[in-house]
Image: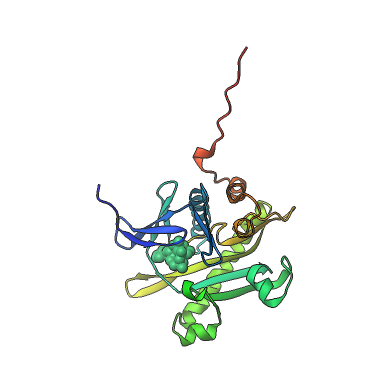
């Protein structure tokens, strides 16, 4: 069988050419990175969990009419998605203060925000993904005013959906990041939620205990990242099939 053509190797995923024009295959790796790849590790099973969780969230969004790039999952580590032109922004939605916003503004982590706050970061690893305003986005032509209106509406719909789903399983959606892609249909273009939605790109805290169930476990050395992501998958009912525990042999008298 001919080897598939690799399009891009990122920190967490590898992209291959898909079987049909306009499609690509996302392969979820076990690599974890933080602080702009200064901290790295290989975390066994992370790719499988993120593939299943991203499928779960993207399918839910598609079902409620929020367009995403997701087409179908191919196997435990790969999914077929529509190929898009990624808008070079990380769109962050925050419901509670945490991470860089807490540091920048001196607000305590965990403080509930009076309303969801949207932030934009320019996707550029060499610059460390700097925070930008809509002024920069318009002036440098990264997105049009129409795009920005659509991005805001998509981001808020994703926030409402994800907050509700997570609340249902006892988890607080503190914040998350999405990427937005352009897809062309004839003469028209529209925006879709792309990349991934997983505990790598969200902050998820247990409502009762405050336990962190996201990539902060890795960033801050708080224990096993696999255990945290497995807990999220278990609560949502999306466990990898291979993880069914096989009992130890028992002696029969
Ligand atoms: N549907 C899509 N079509 C095209 N590119 C996509 C799509 N979904 C995600 N991407 C891009 O694929 C790459 C995914 O790889 P990964 O998340 O590992 O990258 P990364 O190391 O975070 O790098 P980057 O800084 O490029 O995001 C990202 O560059 C992302 O923007
Ligand atoms: Mg990425």
Location of the C terminus (image quadrant): top right
| Left or right: 100, with 178 as reference point | right
Note whether residue 219 is visible.
yes
> Which sits in the foreground, 205 or 159?
205
Residue 19, given in percent of the width and then of the height, sits at 30, 55
Q: What scheme was used to colour the molecule?
A: rainbow
Figure label count: 0
Note whether residue 68 is visible.
no
Q: Residue at x 44, y 71 (%)?
A: 191
Residue 250, given in percent of the width and then of the height, sits at 60, 21
Residue 158, given in percent of the width and then of the height, sits at 56, 65
Q: Residue at x 57, y 23 (%)?
A: 249
Q: Residue at x 55, y 31 (%)?
A: 246
Q: Vertically, is 206 above or below 118? A: above
Residue 129, given in percent of the width and then of the height, sits at 52, 74
Can you name the residue that lies furthest to the left here? 2
Can you name the residue that lies furthest to the top here? 253
Can you name the residue that lies furthest to the front here? 38
């Amino acid at each position: 069988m001919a080897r598939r053509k690799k399009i891009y190797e990122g920190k967490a995923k590898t992209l291959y050419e898909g079987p049909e024009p306009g499609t690509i295959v996302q392969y979820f790796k076990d690599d974890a990175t933080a602080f702009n790849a200064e901290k790295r590790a290989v975390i066994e099973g992370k790719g499988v969990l993120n593939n299943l969780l991203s499928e779960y969230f993207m399918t839910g969004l598609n079902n409620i009419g929020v367009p995403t790039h997701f087409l179908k999952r191919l196997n435990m580590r790969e999914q077929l998605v529509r190929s898009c032109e990624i808008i070079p922004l990380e769109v962050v939605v925050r419901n509670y203060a945490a991470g860089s916003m807490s540091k920048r503004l001196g607000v305590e982590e965990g403080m509930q925000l009076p309303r969801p706050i949207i932030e934009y970061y320019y996707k550029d690893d060499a610059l460390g993904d700097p925070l930008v305003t809509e002024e920069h986005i318009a002036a440098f032509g990264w997105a049009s005013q129409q795009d920005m209106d659509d991005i805001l509406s998509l981001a808020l719909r994703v926030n409402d959906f994800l907050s509700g789903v997570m609340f249902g399983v006892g988890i607080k959606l503190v914040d998350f990041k999405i990427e937005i892609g352009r897809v062309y249909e004839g003469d028209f273009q529209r925006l879709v939620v792309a990349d991934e939605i997983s505990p790598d790109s969200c902050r998820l805290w247990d409502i009762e205990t405050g336990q962190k169930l996201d990539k902060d476990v890795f960033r801050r050395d708080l224990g096993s990242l696999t255990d945290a992501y497995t807990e999220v998958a278990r609560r949502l009912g999306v466990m990898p099939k291979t993880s069914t525990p096989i009992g130890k042999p028992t002696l029969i008298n």
